[in-house]
Amino acid sequence: MTIPIKVVPATESHAISFRQVHTEDGGRIRYRKICELDGRQLQDDEIGKGYEVSKDTIVAVTDEDLAEMPLPTAKAIEIVAFVPAASIDPVRIGTSYYLQPDGQVA
């Protein structure tokens, strides 16, 4: 049996995030996106996704390519078995999540 689901974080992050700054004048440090082939700095709209097939071979992948992939279980999980909660080491769980039904079928 498969059930369409949505994964939702069960906890709220209270982590503090910092910015990198130049210690001398407090200027914010930024990361520039530079093309390895021509050395140009790129804008976000010039950057796409790629899948690394081998060390020197990357295949471009578009959002349309991903949308057309036949992934029937991309938004569904198959329940195979349940285990007692005591049998799972809490350290291995990490972040907790809730599963919510997604769609009319759920």
Image (tube, grey):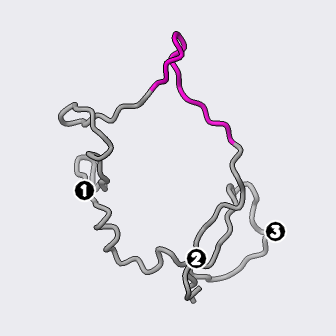
Above or below residue 97? Residue 15 is above
Residue pointed to by mark 2: 5
Q: Residue furthest right?
A: 86
Q: Mark 3 points at which residue?
A: 86
Instruction: Please tell me whether residue 86 is drawn above or below residue 3 in the rendered image.
Output: above
Q: Kindly state the secondary structure of the residue where label 3 is placed.
A: helix
Please indicate whether residue 102 sits to the left or right of residue 9 in the image.
left
In which quadrant of the rendered image does the N terminus lie?
A: bottom right
Q: What stretch is highlighted in magenta?
A: 15-29
Which residue sits at x=28%, y=60%? 61
Secondary element at image label 2: strand
Which of discs 2 and 3 lies nearer the camera? The answer is 2
Amino acid type at image mark 1: Ala
Q: Position of residue 19 (x, y in %)?
A: 55, 29
Which mark's residue is nearer the viewer, 2 or 1?
2
- 42 or 77, which lies in front? 42
Disc 2 versus disc 3: distance between alpha carbons? Answer: 25 Å
Q: Nearer the viewer, mark 3 or mark 1?
A: 1
Kindly report the distance in space between the C-alpha atoms of the residues bearing marks 3 and 1: 45 Å
Q: Residue 60's mark?
A: 1
Question: Is 38 or 93 nearer to us in this picture?
Answer: 38
Tell me if residue 26 is in the magenta stretch.
yes
Task: Name which residue type carries label 2.
Answer: Ile
Which quadrant is home to the C terminus? bottom right
Which label was assigned to residue 20? Answer: none
Mark 2 and mark 3 in contact? Answer it, CB < 8 Å.
no
